[in-house]
Each structure stands twice: as C-alpha cells, then as structure tokens.
Amino acid sequence: MHPETHLQLHHVRSAELRSQSAEFHLAHRCAAPRKGLRARLGWTMVELGLRVIPDRTAVPPRAPRMA
C-alpha cells in the first residue's frame, strides 16, 4: 500500500474515534445517576462484605519456624 494512502486511512480512523469519543462523553454526562433498588442493594452488599472480612490488625503474627 502506498505510504500516503496508509497515512490517510489513519487520519480517517482517528477522526472516527474522536467523534465516537465525543458522543460517548455526551451520552455519559447526560445519564441520570443510578439511585434505584439495584444500586442500593449493590452498595449494601459491599458494606456487608467489608464487615465480614476479618480485621488483620487483631490477628497476632505467626512465630517463625525453627528448623
């Protein structure tokens, strides 16, 4: 393929990606925040999981083995 043709294809693809990126950012900015039952349930599960994990500072370190 001719180098200039190859470069032109890169420029076209770059422009396409920029326009898609701009559309994505606009759509993402306009989306309403999730305040439904699903989001609340998810955060409740995260909090519960963090409470279930044992606190590592309360566990004494193991003594080194003597060989």
Image (cartoon, helix red, strand yellow):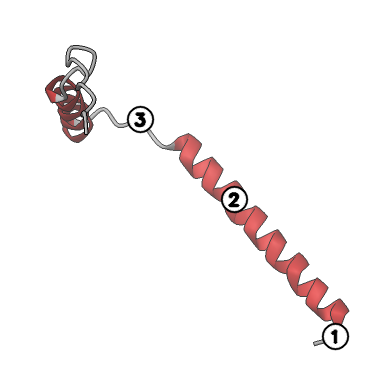
Amino acid tagged 2: Ser
Q: In the image, is residue 31 above or below residue 4?
A: above
Few, some or many C-alpha atoms within 10 Å of disc 1 (few <14, some 14-19, many ≥20)?
A: few
Left or right of 31 on screen, residue 42: left
Image quarter hosting the C terminus: top left
Residue at image mark 2: 21
Q: In the image, is residue 32 above or below residue 11?
A: above
Image quarter hosting the N terminus: bottom right
SS at badge 2: helix
Tag on residue 36? none
Few, some or many C-alpha atoms within 10 Å of disc 3 (few <14, some 14-19, many ≥20)?
A: few
Going from the N terminus, do you reach mark 1 or mark 2 first? 1
- The image shows residue 37 at horizontal and vertical percentages of 16, 31
Going from the N terminus, do you reach mark 2 or mark 3 first? 2
Residue at image mark 3: 33
- The image shows residue 33 at horizontal and vertical percentages of 35, 30
Residue at image mark 1: 2
Q: Label 2 to label 3, Cα distance in Å?
A: 20 Å
Image marks 2 and 3: residues in contact by CB distance under 8 Å: no
Question: Which residue is at 75% across, 74% downward?
Answer: 9
SS at badge 1: loop
Question: Which residue is at 82% across, 80% downward?
Answer: 5
